[in-house]
Amino acid sequence: MLNRTVSQARSFKQNPNHFPRKLNVRIYNALSRTQPKYPLPKNPKRILIQCQEKIGDGILVFPLLHGLNKIFPNLNIDLLCSKHNRSIFKRLPHVKKLFIYKNGKKLWKDLASNKYDLFYNTKDHPSITSFKIAKHVNAKVKVCISNIRHNQHYNYALKNSNVKTILEKNALLLNEYDQSIKIKSWLDLSGNQSNNNDVCINISAGSPYREWSLKKWIDLINMIFINDKSTKINIIAMNKDQDKINLIKKKIGYPINFYSNFNNILDSVRILSKSKVLISPDTAMIHLADAAKIKILGLYSADNLNVEKYSPLFSKYKILQSDSLRLKNIETEKVFIEYRKLIME
């Protein structure tokens, strides 16, 4: 029976519902030849990186990109991303070209016609789509994160036995080139953060499972304001949650700053820069706040491995977990208590 505290998005090694995928991968591997093993190029000039498809996962690739740019200042970096996170990568000056998943024959043609010294797949789980991408990429050395089910499609496998977070996993390639390098935050807000008492609350989430009820958000906002009426509260919501902002405005009479209709999630950095703490469900906003080294109070599901993989790395933080895959079971009072503790640190 499926564990109700384990995410459906978990890799198929741990999710019993993924048996058809397991079978398809086994058949594909049995019919595919093993690629020869090569060392990493010492001084790559051009790299293609395959990223995860979601916006939050895309943000977690930023430290890798900045680290590569530091090690190899003249390096040309191209990315294979999705239509969902393409917009955030367009903001990076050292990314030259973007290729989009599921572009059919055009994608295969683009992968074959562009020559690379190195291709790096940041995904640590096997998929037939990734196998086909590795087959079509025109690269001298094709690199993966070691997994017995997909190593045969690559020339070099990175060992990941000691890493826990996705940030650290993505950066394994950096360590191959410079063992002394440390993963650093890519978002520098030094000199931009004001010395006020602002609190940033993100009410948007990437899926219904990660949504907290509107009533609980309203109750929490009231608790924060009553506790200290000098606190400035900034509410962030993505376009799809504009109706929630309108309802909060009707329920709460005192001044609150509302921000929505962002063309790009990176535009919300200007709001984070005003804040001392972010309160948010487990979503991309937490990764932005972590990069900005802003205190974080995160609401997560009961999936412990997910918490381990996606916890902040650079910021002081507190994580509150639900007892199920839905965040709605997290009590408002507990969130408020942990908020008070966090702002006092």
Image (cartoon, grey):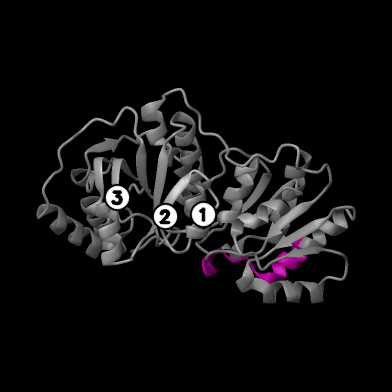
Q: Looking at the image, which residue is at 68% across and 73% down? A: 242
Q: Looking at the image, which residue is at 34% across and 54% down? A: 11
Residue 103 x/y as whole percent: 33, 66
User: Is residue 252 or residue 38 the one in the foreground?
Assistant: 38
In terms of image quadrants, where is residue 262? Answer: bottom right
> Is residue 85 visible in this depiction of the protein?
no
Q: Is residue 175 above or below residue 304?
A: above
- Graded by Cα atoms within 10 Å as few (under 14), some (14 to 19) or many (20 or more), the crowding at tag 1 reads few
Q: Amino acid at mark 1?
A: Lys
Q: Which residue is mark 2?
A: 98
Which label number is shown at residue 90?
1
> N-terminal of the two: label 2 or label 3?
2
As for residue 214 lying within the magenta part, the answer is: yes
The Cα–Cα distance between marks 2 and 1, rounded to whole angstroms, is 8 Å
Which of pointers 2 and 3 indicates the residue nearer the eye? Answer: 3
Residue 21 x/y as whole percent: 24, 62
Q: Amino acid at mark 3?
A: Asn
Residue 35 x/y as whole percent: 15, 42
Q: Which residue is mark 3?
A: 114
The range drawn in magenta is 207-220
